[in-house]
Image (cartoon, grey):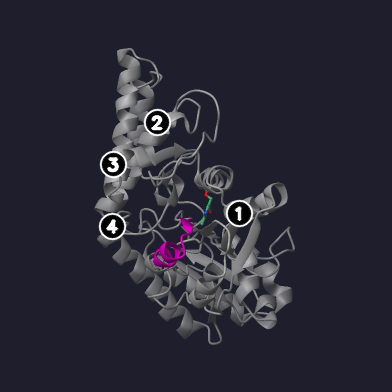
């Protein structure tokens, strides 16, 4: 059976060139990058080269990039440090952020008595910019806006320039969770009014367990992990050299083939939309995921015209056919809580129907779309 992987927003297949580079580093560069001898120095050189590669792509200085273990850690670092070190008293965010932001914000509310204000989300999954402006205009205390660039469930895109300008106008800090967009979108951070972005290598064909955070150099933060002087004292702990080089390789690979990859992935998505519309009358697209201006080219979240009681069978049905995608409906298996994103934008009726997220990568093929749409059609018609 040919397996089909359409869950690239959860994680991606690692590039073979990344594995080769990592293996080479593990064999040849085992020195501790903090040692001053030649073994240590060669590891240090690799780390600083990786840092520079990322910084150059974003048009910032290398000293503004810190390596972490993942996107979640980076988000934690930004939010917790902003409250602790930058006197932030109000966090402005939305109910459709990733849990790496939402749960940290809840934690800060409980432990630091921070005020949390949620920006309204429109039916199409975009944030209400007028509401954001209104919140910031009336905010009397030091604030941080934390809004994600690409939503990981419905693909809606935040206008970073617009939000950055609003933050500048009202003197707010701006953090954007860019985990879903690094390696897919270009960023010129010198032109954007943005203080923090974050990345995670496993979302762009790199290894798991490595990420980074960009922190604008005008901000002075205290160490987040205390110990040695690694990452200029901000995050102690011996650096994972092979993971850092793996991330750099995946990052370079993504940006040097960006246009061709993005075009291929967008065509896959357009093909999926066209063919599912034809095959399943009554299909709905959650948020604005069928609109290419407001939604990422790699994520599609559909609501199927199927009864609630058959939802669980759908997952099983796709799984036995070797099709991996993500369930994003009201009642997620095991938890019964459903997707907090879909809960924020769908009607009660649509929440009862099964929704699925398909997310594509450069490794997917058009033939796979034909197979998946036909499996979905068969399931819907067997009602
Ligand atoms: N933020 C977003 C938008 C994500 O999609 C994810 C992962 O799904 C994360 C943060 C967490 O990243 P990591 O898996 O590297 O901790």
Mark found first going from the N terminus, 4 or 3: 3
Question: Mark 2 falls on what kind of element?
Answer: helix
Q: Which residue is mark 2?
A: 242
Q: CA distance from mark 4 to mark 1?
A: 39 Å
User: Dot 4: what SS?
Assistant: helix
Q: Which residue is mark 1?
A: 89
Q: For residue 211, which quarter of the picture?
A: top left
3D distance between C-alphas at marks 3 and 2: 15 Å
Q: Is residue 143 above or below residue 289?
A: above
Mark 3 or mark 2: which comes first in sequence?
Answer: 3
Q: Is residue 50 left or right of residue 202?
A: left
Of residue 257 and residue 144, the one placed in the foreground of this image is 144
- Which is in the foreground here, disc 1 or disc 2? 1
Residue that carries the numbered disc 4 in the rendered image: 258
Cα gap from disc 4 to disc 2, whole angstroms: 24 Å
Q: Assign the C terminus to one quadrant of the image.
A: bottom right
Q: Are marks 3 and 2 in contact (CB under 8 Å)?
A: no
Residue marked by disc 3:
53
């Amino acid at each position: 059976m040919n397996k089909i992987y359409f869950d690239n927003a959860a994680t991606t297949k690692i590039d073979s060139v990344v594995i080769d580079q990592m293996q080479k580093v593990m064999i040849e560069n085992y020195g501790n990058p903090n040692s001053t001898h030649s073994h240590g120095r060669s590891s240090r050189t690799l780390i600083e080269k990786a840092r520079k590669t990322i910084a150059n792509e974003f048009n910032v200085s290398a000293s503004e990039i810190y390596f972490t273990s993942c996107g979640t850690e980076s988000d934690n670092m930004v939010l917790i440090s902003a409250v602790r070190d930058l006197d932030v008293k109000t966090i402005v965010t939305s109910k459709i952020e990733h849990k790496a932001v939402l749960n940290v914000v809840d934690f800060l509310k409980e432990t630091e008595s921070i005020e949390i204000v949620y920006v309204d989300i429109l039916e199409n999954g975009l944030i209400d910019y007028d509401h954001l402006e209104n919140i910031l205009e009336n905010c009397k205390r030091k604030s941080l806006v934390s809004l994600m660039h690409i939503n990981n469930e419905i693909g809606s895109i935040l206008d970073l320039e617009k939000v950055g300008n609003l933050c500048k106008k009202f003197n707010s800090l701006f953090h954007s969770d860019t985990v879903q967009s690094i390696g897919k979108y270009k960023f010129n951070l010198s032109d954007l009014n943005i203080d923090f972005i974050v990345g995670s290598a496993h979302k762009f064909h790199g290894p798991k367990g490595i990420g980074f955070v960009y922190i604008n150099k005008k901000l002075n933060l205290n160490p987040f992990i205390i110990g040695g002087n690694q990452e200029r004292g901000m995050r102690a702990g011996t650096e994972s050299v092979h993971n850092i080089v793996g991330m750099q390789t995946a990052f370079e690979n993504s940006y040097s083939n960006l246009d061709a990859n993005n075009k291929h992935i967008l065509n896959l998505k357009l093909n999926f939309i066209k063919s599912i519309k034809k095959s399943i009358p009554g299909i709905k697209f959650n948020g604005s995921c069928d609109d290419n201006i407001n939604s990422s080219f790699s994520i599609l979240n559909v609501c199927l015209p199927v009864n609630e009681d058959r939802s669980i069978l759908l997952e099983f049905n796709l799984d036995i056919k070797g099709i991996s995608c993500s369930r994003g409906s009201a009642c997620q298996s095991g938890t019964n809580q459903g997707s907090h994103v879909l809960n924020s934008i769908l009607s009660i009726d649509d929440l009862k129907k099964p929704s699925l997220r398909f997310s594509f990568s450069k490794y997917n093929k058009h033939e796979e779309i034909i197979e998946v749409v036909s499996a979905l059609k068969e399931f819907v018609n067997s009602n």
